[in-house]
Image (cartoon, rainbow, N blue to C red):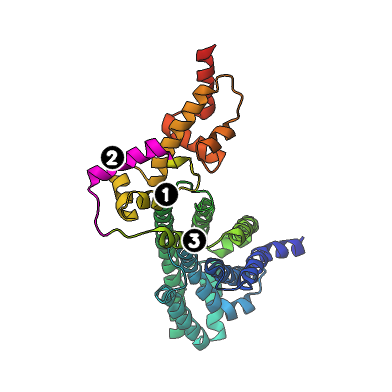
């Protein structure tokens, strides 16, 4: 039984270490985001390794690597944020990333220096008072031990702030990226990062569990053997993240490439009123929305205007993104086809393809959003009217 418990303690380490090695063995230039995820996984592996050492009661060894735990623990959220940036904004690692790493580096180095200066008796006090019971020692005679305790609690405060700040920044980046692609592509399939919601949920779970751990102290989890539950949960979630991350391309690279390749610059802007009329005329007469690969640059080039100008016009005049604007025409076209198919000879997937949607799920979602009911319900109403 004890052997099984020890294996469960180490499972999050095995999972993160495995994915970290897999991602870092890939060429850096082919997918920098995946490489960033590999660094995140190795930092998480260091955290879970030190956790496993502690909860398997190897306290003497843990005290030697406590500085490593502090450094890796304070790196996890910044590295997660770097990964999100590499998927949604940056093409490569930037020098400004260093500033996000400084708190972890400075606190860990200072803690390690204080730990070296502290006696064996001081380490025992630190272990039993701070690590096991999460309390400030009643009497401290060694200045270095006092600094160890202060730095430990300071690191917990920094970690709590990080979890909130980087979570908010990551969510903002994801939403900004989704707005960007919605204003460029008419079909978002293959570009949208829907699975990042799982990463955000995982981050929230990690923040909550870490907060509870900080309040209750590690000894609480150790006494009740509750640490096995988060170990199993995190092992599963981290494996899923690694599996999905391994399949994920650096989407922002393709977006930037598409934007730069297709866009043309026109020095003389067209008036907004005239451009709006020409846009509606183009959509109604030539039906470019039937092309599943339609991009806003296809329209802007045909209207002899800039992409950004056309995008702003759609956002301001029609109060929607380019993607929603095109889907509105596609849904109306699909409704006309459904009205003609009174005996229901064709499937909804057929109408989805004919209207220019990239997938049936996109069609069903857009139809429900625009009409307030599903395409199936709308179709059944049409059939009843003809009976």
* Residue located at (29% from left, 53% from top): 309
* Residue located at (41% from left, 41% from top): 326
Q: Along the polypeptide, which appears first: circle 2 or circle 1?
A: 1
Q: Give, as a single range, the part of the protein colored magenta.
A: 267-287
Q: Which residue is mark 3?
A: 254
Q: Along the polypeptide, which appears first: circle 2 or circle 3?
A: 3
Q: Which residue is mark 1?
A: 182
Q: Quadrant of residue 124?
A: bottom right
Mark 2 vs mark 1, foreground winner is 2
Distance (Cα) linking label 1 and label 3: 14 Å
Tag on residue 292?
none
* Residue located at (50% from left, 22% from top): 339
Q: Pinpoint residue 22: horizontal percent, then vertical percent.
A: 65, 69
Q: Pinpoint residue 204: horizontal percent, then vertical percent.
A: 49, 55
Q: Is residue 125 visible?
A: no
Distance (Cα) linking label 2 and label 1: 22 Å
Q: Residues within 10 Å of mark 1 (few under 14, many from 20)?
A: many
Distance (Cα) linking label 2 and label 3: 32 Å
Q: Regarding mark 3 in the picture, which secondary structure is present there?
A: helix
In the picture, the quarter occupied by the N terminus is bottom right
Q: Along the polypeptide, which appears first: circle 1 or circle 3?
A: 1
């Amino acid at each position: 039984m004890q052997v099984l418990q020890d294996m469960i303690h180490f499972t999050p380490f095995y999972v993160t270490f495995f994915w970290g090695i897999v991602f870092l063995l890939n060429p850096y230039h082919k997918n920098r985001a995946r490489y960033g995820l590999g660094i995140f996984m190795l930092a998480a592996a260091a955290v879970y390794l030190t956790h496993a050492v502690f909860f398997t009661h190897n306290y003497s060894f843990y005290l030697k690597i406590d500085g490593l735990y502090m450094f890796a623990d304070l790196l996890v959220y910044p590295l997660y944020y770097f990964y999100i940036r590499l998927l949604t904004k940056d093409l490569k690692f930037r020098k400004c990333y260093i500033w996000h790493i400084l708190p972890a580096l400075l606190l860990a180095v200072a803690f390690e220096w204080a730990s070296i200066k502290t006696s064996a008796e001081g380490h025992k006090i630190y272990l039993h008072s701070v690590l096991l019971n999460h309390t400030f020692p009643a009497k401290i005679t060694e200045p270095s031990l006092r600094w160890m305790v202060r730095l430990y609690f300071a690191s917990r405060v920094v970690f709590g702030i990080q979890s909130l700040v980087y979570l908010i920044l990551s969510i903002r980046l994801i939403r900004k990226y989704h707005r960007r692609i919605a204003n460029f592509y008419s079909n978002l399939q293959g570009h949208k990062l829907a699975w990042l919601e799982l990463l955000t949920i995982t981050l929230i779970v990690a923040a909550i569990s870490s907060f509870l751990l900080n309040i209750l102290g590690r000894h609480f989890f150790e006494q009740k053997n509750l640490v096995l539950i988060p170990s199993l949960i995190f092992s599963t979630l981290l494996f899923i993240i690694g599996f999905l991350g391994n399949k994920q391309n650096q989407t922002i690279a393709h977006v930037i490439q598409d934007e730069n390749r297709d866009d043309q610059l026109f020095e003389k802007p067209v008036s907004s009123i005239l451009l709006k009329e020409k846009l509606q005329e183009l959509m109604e007469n030539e039906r470019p929305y039937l092309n599943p690969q339609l991009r806003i640059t296809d329209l802007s080039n045909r209207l002899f205007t800039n992409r950004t100008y056309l995008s702003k016009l759609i956002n301001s005049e029609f109060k929607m993104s380019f993607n929603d604007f095109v889907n509105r025409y596609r849904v109306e076209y699909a409704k006309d086809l459904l009205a003609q198919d009174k005996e229901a000879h064709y499937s909804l997937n057929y109408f989805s393809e004919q209207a220019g949607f990239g997938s049936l799920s996109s069609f069903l979602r857009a139809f429900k959003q625009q009409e307030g009911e599903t395409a199936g319900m709308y179709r059944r109403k049409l059939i009843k009217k003809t009976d």
